[in-house]
Every structure is written in C-alpha cells, then in structure tokens.
Amino acid sequence: IFLPNNTQPGFMNLVVGDGGSETFTSPRYNFKITPTIAAGQTFNSTTSGKILEIKGIFMRTVDSDGRDVPLTVDSRPGGLVCNSLKDGDGLSFTCVLGPGFGSSHAMNVYYNLKPIGSFAVSYNPPYLSTFEQEKDGTIKMIGKDLGESVKDSIITVIYSDGNTVNGTVIEGRHDSLTFKYPVGNRNNASYIFQLGDQKSNKAGPFTLKPIIENTDPAVPCGGGVVTINGHYFFKYTKDTTAITIGKVPCNISSINETTIECVIVPNLRSLSPYYTSGTKSLVISSSNPGTEKVYQLTPAGLNYKFAPPTITNTSAIDQTALITIYGTSFGDANLEILINDKPCTQPEINIHTYSSLTCNVTNYDEMKIYNYTNTKFNISISVDGQYFIADIFQFKYESGIIYSENKSTGFPNEMYLGFVVFVIFIALISFAAKNQIEKYFEERKSRKAFRSLDNLRLKLRQKHATEIAKHYTFGEQSAPKPDKSTFYDIRKKLSRLPLIRRCFKEHTD
C-alpha cells in the first residue's frame, strides 16, 4: 500500500472494501504512520541562530486526531536545540535553531523519544571588520558571527615582526567583542579571533591612539598638579611632550603608559583671557617620530574646565572695613566680589592656598548705621566669568576699643594692667639684687676681720721672737722652706677663706 507523503503520522484504521457492500476494517493500533527524515541534510547558521526547514515524509506536527506529534530536535549531549516546530505540507517542517558556535553539530530528530533521523549544523566562522577604542582603554572589534561565549573566545594580537600575544576578552556579542589590550609598548598590530574550533580572518593592522579617560575634570584655579588618566601613551616622553589646557601650559612632572601628571600655573591676570569660563580642550603634542603630532580631546563631555570659585565662610569686618572671605579657587583673573550688589574693592588673594582673600566693604558705614547685626546678605564672587553666590554672609563687625571715663589719666584698663605687671617685675628684680649685694659686703667684712687677726699674730711673734727662742729650741735642724710650687699662691689664698679654715683643722693648729 503506497500512502501519500503528506499523510499525517500516528495510528490509523485500515478499511478494505471490494467496491461493493463488503468491507473490512482493521483494528486501529495495527497500523502506525511514522515521520521519516531525509538523510544527508546539512545546514549553515549565524551564531545568533536560524530557522531550519527539515525535509522527509509524513512530516506533520499534528496527527489524524488533531493531537500534537511528539517530535523533538536537539544535539545531545551538545546542548543545541531546535524549537518551535511548525507543520508544513507533509514533506517538511521548520524549527528555530538557537544561538551557538562551532562546526558540524549533529542534530537528532526524535519521535516519541525514539530517533527517526538526523542532520548536521555548522555555524558561520567569526569575521572581523573594524576597530574601535573605548574611553576606558578597552578595544572593541566590530564584525559578525562573533558569538556570546567569553570562555570559548581567544583574541590574538599580531605585531609587525610576527610576534603574537593574547588579549583578554571581557565581553562577546554576535556583532562585536570587547577585549583588553595586552601590556606592552607597541601601538600597531593586527588581530585574529578564535571562537571554539573556528578562526576569523586577520584584521588590521590598526594603530592605537592615546585615550583620555577623565570625564569633565576640573583644573584647580590656584594652579597645582593635574592628573590625566588614560591609555596608550606609548610614544610620549617627558622631554619631548608638551601639554596645554585651553592655551595655558601644563608642565609635565611624570608620564607613563596610563597616567600623565603635570603642573598648571595659577589663574592670574597675566594669563587672561586664556582663563575663560567654560570647557577647555586638552592638547598633547610630541616631537617623537611615530607619534601623533597633536592629540586634541574634542568629544563633548570630556573637555577640561577650570574649577569655579566657592565661598565657605567669612570673617567679621574690622574697623578699617576689611573682610576676609574663605573658599576655594580664588583666582584674580577678572575677579569681582559683590556684597548685596555692592562691590568689595581692592581684593588681595592668598597666593599660597588660593582659598582666602581680603577686600574692603564699600557699604560698611551703611551696615553699621542701620545696625544690620545678624542680618544675612548675599555675597557673590566671579572669577573669569564663573560665578558663585552664597547666602551665608552674616553681618558682624569688630567693636572699637572702649576707654575708661572715670580716670583722669585717660589710660585704658589694658595699660593699667601692664603697668602693674611691670612694677611687680621691677620689685622682684630689686629684692633679689639687694640680697646679693648685702651678702657680698658681709663676706668682704668677714674676710677683712680674719686678715687683721693674722696680721696681729705675726706682729706678736716678731716682737717676742727672742723670748720664744729661749724656751723653744729646734737643735741644728733648719726650718722647712716654704712651698713655691705653681699652686702655692692659690692654696695660700684658699686657706684664708672662712669655709676652708673651718673644714681643715690642721690649718688652725
């Protein structure tokens, strides 16, 4: 019995008749129609997937009773599936192949979980076309059939001398891939991408350009160190590179592959109108061969700007109508200060910190007359077109020196206090000097009395020398000669001191 190819699969009743009234009907479950897949079918697909049309006979997704035919298509154990089967004309049906990569995937077709045939699927190999640099230093390759599997991706960097090194893929899409450039100092290379068992074409060579990563950085108005964060400053050196922000030079202090530090001069009148409000393009120029002569940062939102001034506090106004204002980025290029719309004149900036300035309040007398104590005023500052307005200024002034009205001398109390302290100081010095002088004269008097006693003793010995000789004899022994050594006179003088006479008894003996 030859059945039509578009016969619905499933169980059927076979009815046999002789053309007359005699018929025979077989039991339903004796006859079963099974879909059959045509052998040798192969398909190609993009990595994002594709609708496949599978051919065969009895290829229906609904049986004769209107029930769904239990067909499934997958690549066990590879994980690829083809879902959303749709009925055709009986000679084919369609399914949607999911995303994937690689070549020669065997897809099996199952009817009631039993295999009824298979076909092969190969995804297109990856293709690289263009090259883009991201602001964060990564590189994006544009192409097609690049897949979504980061773990199965390899990007190879090929230098002009043939050396290769792998980058690090961090994101994969079907039409692009993003990777980190390998560490090194070469800015010219070609690229090959491998996804699974398939390799792409060789793209390039492409040349890396330096990238500035800073997003709208503010340059200090008072000058100082500016850090330029970026990537691929391979060919830029300190001695051959010049940097300007707007038209203001920034002197390079250090430079490496990802960072440049330079020192910008303060925002002074001498540089105006170079310091103007708004953003400034940063220009990096180098005289090294093989580097870009000028690299100018032009995209919107990435230009540099000079920091606007801010006000944080104010001092009291002194008797000369002078006020000190504290804040940040106080430059003197086109500097203007207003207190309640009245100018504060003759401003002087602290050139060491650029965080404070002093100026003369022109409406000080008016404030004092109306006693605006505890009244808040608007205070604004403008540096080269950039404004800051604060409502924090509270009027305070230093009270004058109050003189005493009940003293005929007219001296202020502070002077009386100083005079009293001075008198006490002189008295203490006089008392100490008096004690020292009295002690000195007492010691001189004592020494004079001892010398008189010694002289009297010598005179008595000379007067009665004859009588003494009668009673005391020393035989033939001569008297010892006096000591005439170097220290004789010193010892003689020391022996006459009262302290020495008391301590050494043998002297008195």
Image: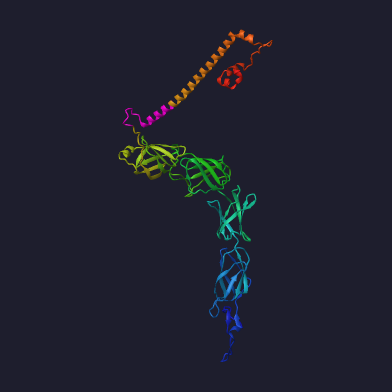
Q: In the figure, is residue 391 to the left or right of 230?
A: left
Residue 359 within the segment the image draws in magenta: no
x then y, percent, for residue 379 = 37, 43
Q: In this rendering, would 474 be left or right of 127?
A: right
Residue projecting furthest to the top: 466
Q: Would residue 369 appear left or right of 464 to someone viewing this image?
A: left
Q: Quadrant of residue 52?
A: bottom right
Q: How far across and how far down the image is residue 209, in percent?
A: 55, 48
Nearer to us in this view, 458 or 92 = 458
Up the image or down, 399 lies above or below 17; here it is: above
Compared to 126, does 81 lie above or below?
A: below
| Residue at image point 50% right, 19% down | 442
**Residue drawn at (55%, 14%) of the image:** 453
Return the residue found at the far bottom: 21
Residue 290 position, x and y percent, is 58, 45
Residue 508, quarter of the rendered image: top right
Query: Residue sitting at 47 percent across and 37 percent down?
Result: 352
| Frontmost residue, 497 versus 93 | 497
Magenta part mainly helix, strand or loop?
helix
**Where is the C terminus found, in terms of image quarters?**
top right
Region of the chain picked out in magenta, as a range? 404-426
In which quadrant is the N terminus drawn?
Answer: bottom right
Pick the residue in front: 45 or 246.
Answer: 246
x then y, percent, for residue 489: 60, 16
User: For this rendering, which residue is in front, 269 or 466?
Assistant: 466
Asked where in the image residue 357 lies, by quadrant, the reply is top left
Verify whether residue 414 appears in magenta: yes
